[in-house]
Image: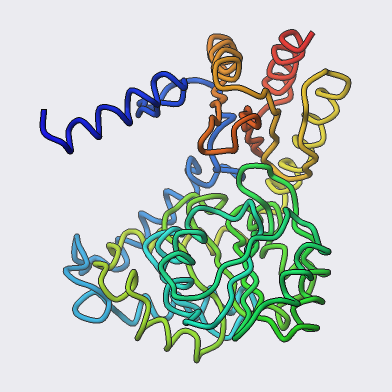
Amino acid sequence: MKPAEKFIKDKLDQRREDGSLRSLTPGNNLVDFCSNDYLGFARSSVLKELITDEMKANNDYFIGSTGSRLLSGNSNYIEDLEKEIAGYHQSEAGLIFNSGYNANLGLFSSLPQKGDTIIMDELAHASIIDGARLSFANRYIFRHNNIISLEEKLKNAGGRKYIAVESIYSMDGDTAPLAQIAGLSEKYDAHLIVDEAHAVGLYKKGLVNELGLEDKVFARLVTFGKALGCHGAIVLGSDMLREYLINFSRSFIYSTAASFHEFAAIKMAYQLLPGSDSAREKLKNNIDYFRESMSGNKLNSIESNSAIQCLVIGNNEDTKKIALRLQQEGLDVRPILSPTVPKGTERLRICVHSFNSKEEIALLAKTINSYAG
């Protein structure tokens, strides 16, 4: 066996021993309690029809983009779409990336420089962490949603200071104290960057807009693959930030642009989003109903008012067992295992949607509660 093959085998064997080996599974017909399709846009017949009509109205499109946006992959359609989305979120400008991961990677790897400081919440998404690692900036971690810890790091930070947080955290589902963080950002002349991936949908335009903090946030990231049911992401900020990313963000410069179909889907999703109040209200009612149904059990539930509801089980094997039991009941709930989350915090990550029925939620809660005793 070659050295690289032995290394690969040893790493995979270790994952098997830990009960943390990942594998791909195909789609299923179970009740969806695991996807990020919070408002049901990904399965919406209305959105499908809008996209079909948009494709027909622009029937001279290429199947593929044929190059990066700096070469042959750009168009007036894309740039107009960026302006529309920026306007919707009350931002000066925006730049679309092929995914949220690429967007965070491109932003954090290109903007902070040697001598600067990035201060991240300890539960920041992997894409933020990876982007920060690729920069030459100093990196500090502050305790999750802890204002005192953040201020301690700001006091010791040098150079240009960047604060990186999510408005709603992808693994815990809890909400950042954005107003307080924005206040600290102003106090220490720092630049606040907010990942809004899981907030748009629960909030019409995201939590930053909901709280009226647009002018206090340096940059925002909005993804299209969660509540919008599409794919891709946009970095929102100033015209100057957009121009900077076009010139210095490697994940933008060296990526082939998405296909026209993807941009058409995003455009139509944004046409549907302003009129989605009833779906958003149903989502919030379903979240409340699930939380009420879960009250009183012995499991450690992370406090969250978002669509992401987490029950900490505490080890890989038990987490997988209860997830399997739920799947046997026809409910698609996935286990989140270490090392995706820290050891001892392995959990069921339950995503509630606007399209889940009360009966489905009741069965979910009943099955979990019977396990919890």
Q: Position of residue 260 (x, y in %)?
A: 29, 64
Out of 329 and 241, give the one closest to the viewer. 241
Q: Return the residue found at the far right.
A: 296
The residue positioned 31% from the left and 59% from the top of the image is 261
Residue 48 as seen in the image, left or right of residue 202: left
Q: Position of residue 364 (x, y in %)?
A: 68, 19
Residue 264 seen in this snapshot: yes
Q: Position of residue 151 (x, y in %)?
A: 79, 70
The correct choice, above or below, for 57 with respect to 14 in the image is: below
Residue 267 seen in this snapshot: no
The residue positioned 70% from the left and 12% from the top of the image is 367
Q: Position of residue 187 (x, y in %)?
A: 80, 83
The residue positioned 37% from the left and 75% from the top of the image is 78
Residue 177 as seen in the image, left or right of residue 192: right
Out of 276 and 169, give the one closest to the viewer. 169
The correct choice, above or below, for 95 with respect to 330 in the image is: below
Would you identify the image quadrant in which residue 186 lies?
Answer: bottom right
Q: How many marks?
A: 0
Q: Return the residue found at the far bottom.
A: 240
The residue positioned 35% from the left and 86% from the top of the image is 247
**Coloring basis for residues:** rainbow
Residue 136 as seen in the image, left or right of residue 251: right
Q: Where, quadrant-wise, is the C terminus in this rendering? A: top right
Would you identify the image quadrant in which residue 274 lies?
Answer: bottom right
